[in-house]
Amino acid sequence: MKIAIYSGSFNPIHNGHIAVAEAALDNGFDEVWLVVSPKNPHKNEEDLWPFNDRLKMAELAIANRSGLKVSDCENKLPRPSYTINTLNFLKKTYPENEFKLLIGGDNLLKFQSWKDHQHIVDEFGLMVYPRLGSTVNAYDHHPNVTRMTMPLLNISSSEIRKQLEKNESVSGLVSTEVENFIRQNIKIDRSNSVF
C-alpha cells in the first residue's frame, strides 16, 4: 500500500489537518497515518498539551473516516522525535508498504534544517500541501517531491489555543468531538479571557 505519513504535534488536531489528510487520499495514497509526535524538536514544549490527550483528540477527529489512521509510534521511539527515525522504524516494521512524508509548504522552506533531510527526500520522498507564505525552493524540481493540489487553508493550532484562552468559540475549526474533549479535559489558561 502507498501510505502518507503525516507527522505533527496536532496540538490540537483541527479541520485543516483532516482536510489535508483526505486530500492526500485523493492524490493517490491508499492510507494516511497521522503520527502524533510526543515532542517536536522544532517547537516549544511549554505549549504542548499532554501526549495522550492529543492522541485521543486525533482518534476522535478521524473516527469513521475511511483511509485515515492514528499512530503513536513516535512515543515508543527515542526523543527528540526525528522524522527520519520514524520513517526508518515504519519501513522496517511494515516492509510491505511504501511510505512518503506529507508536509506543508511552510515546513519545506526550513526542511534543510531537519535531521537527515536529504535521506528523507531520496529514500521516502515528500508530498507537499500548500500553506500560506510557502514559496518555490530548491526541492521544487526534485523527482521525489510532489506538490499536492488543494485549497489553501488558514487554520492553525496555535490560533485555536489562543481563542480557547480567550474563551472564544472554536466551532468550525475543530470537530465537535474534539471541541467537547478539549472543554472537558484540557486545562486552559484563561488569563487572556475577555469575559
Image (cartoon, rainbow, N blue to C red):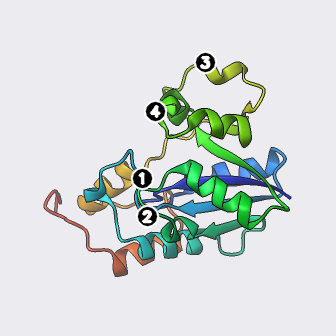
Query: Where residue 121 sits: x, y (%)?
Result: 67, 35
The image's mark for residue 38 is 2
What's under tag 3, amino acid-wise?
A: Ala
Counting other residues with Cα less than 10 Å from the Cα at mark 4, is it few (<14), some (14-19), or many (20 or more)? few
Q: Are marks 1 and 2 in contact (CB under 8 Å)?
A: no
Q: Are marks 3 and 1 in contact (CB under 8 Å)?
A: no
Q: Splitting the image into 4 quarters, where does residue 59 fall?
A: bottom right
The image's mark for residue 40 is 1
Q: CA distance from mark 2 to mark 3?
A: 30 Å
Instruction: Determine whether the residue tagged by mark 1 lies in a helix, strand or loop.
Output: loop
Counting other residues with Cα less than 10 Å from the Cα at mark 1, is it few (<14), some (14-19), or many (20 or more)? some
Q: Residue at (82%, 59%) from the top-left corner? A: 97
Instruction: Determine whether the residue tagged by mark 3 lies in a helix, strand or loop.
Output: helix
Query: Where residue 177 sits: x, y (%)?
Result: 52, 75
Q: Are marks 3 and 4 in contact (CB under 8 Å)?
A: no
Q: CA distance from mark 2 to mark 4?
A: 19 Å
Query: Where residue 119 sits: x, y (%)?
Result: 64, 37
Query: Which residue is the site of mark 4?
Result: 113
- Given this view, does label 4 or label 1 mark the residue nearer the observer? 4
Q: Are marks 2 and 4 in contact (CB under 8 Å)?
A: no
Query: Which residue is the site of mark 3?
Result: 138
On-image quarter of the N terminus: bottom right
Identify which residue, 117 or 160, lies in the foreground. 117
Q: Residue at (51%, 71%) from the top-left corner? A: 76
Identify which residue, 97 or 7, lies in the foreground. 97
Earlier residue among tags 2 and 3: 2
On-image quarter of the C terminus: bottom left
* Residue 125 in view: no
